[in-house]
Amino acid sequence: MRVLRWLQQVFSNSRRQRLQFWWRVAGLGLLWGWAVTVGGCRTSTPAPRQVTLQQSWELEPGDVVSGYLVTASLGDISIYLKGHTLRAPFSGDIEPAAAGVNCIYFSTPEIPAYLFRFCGLRRPNLGPIALGEVMGSGEYVHFATLRRQPDGTWAIVEPSSNVLERALQSR
């Protein structure tokens, strides 16, 4: 009789434990689904943006010299980020640059005549982005400001310290 009671307790406890286990698994599945949905897991990558510059220099980002990759050129400001993050200075869009490795273009409807190029970012966050969201991180980041010209080309202009400061602030 004692053995029978003991077996009933073991099986009833294991059934309870199995139910608790499956509830935990289901809860983790729901939590993961929520994190992917709310966390903004982006499913589509924007097409690389082709920008025609009004100026041209012998060396541009993306060129290779003696087997070494050029990551910045005339008009770029280089910042030593030490692996820290760079944040969106405004709400806008991030597109990969067609020319240049690890380069992105940031655009915002708040300043439609300007594009901001950031090179050297690891794992950039492409697509729509909100103010203060992480754009990416890197050891060195090269920053350039481009202004749309009346003929549709872009000219590299004096870098905007205001935009750069906003991108470097940790929120």
Image (spheres, rainbow, N blue to C red):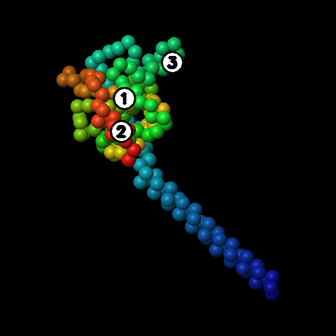
Q: Which residue is mark 3?
A: 68
Q: Quadrant of residue 78?
A: top left
Q: Amino acid at mark 2?
A: Ala
Pointer 3 with pointer 1, Cβ within 8 A: no
| Residue in the image at 36% along x and 34% along y | 95
Q: Amino acid at mark 3?
A: Tyr
Distance (Cα) linking label 3 and label 1: 20 Å
Q: Which residue is mark 1?
A: 143
Tell me residue 91's x, y (percent). Answer: 30, 43
| Crowd rating for badge 2 (residues with CA inside 10 Å; few <14, some 14–19, many 20+) | many
| Residue in the image at 64% along x and 74% along y | 16
| Residue in the image at 41% along x and 30% along y | 79
Q: Is residue 131 visible?
A: yes
Pointer 2 with pointer 1, Cβ within 8 A: yes
Disc nearer the start of the sequence (2/3): 3
| Residue in the image at 52% along x and 16% along y | 67
Question: Vertically, is 78 above or below 54?
Answer: below
Looking at the rendered structure, the secondary structure element under dot 3 is strand
Labelled disc at residue 8: none
Closer to the camera, 22 or 124?
124
| Crowd rating for badge 1 (residues with CA inside 10 Å; few <14, some 14–19, many 20+) | many
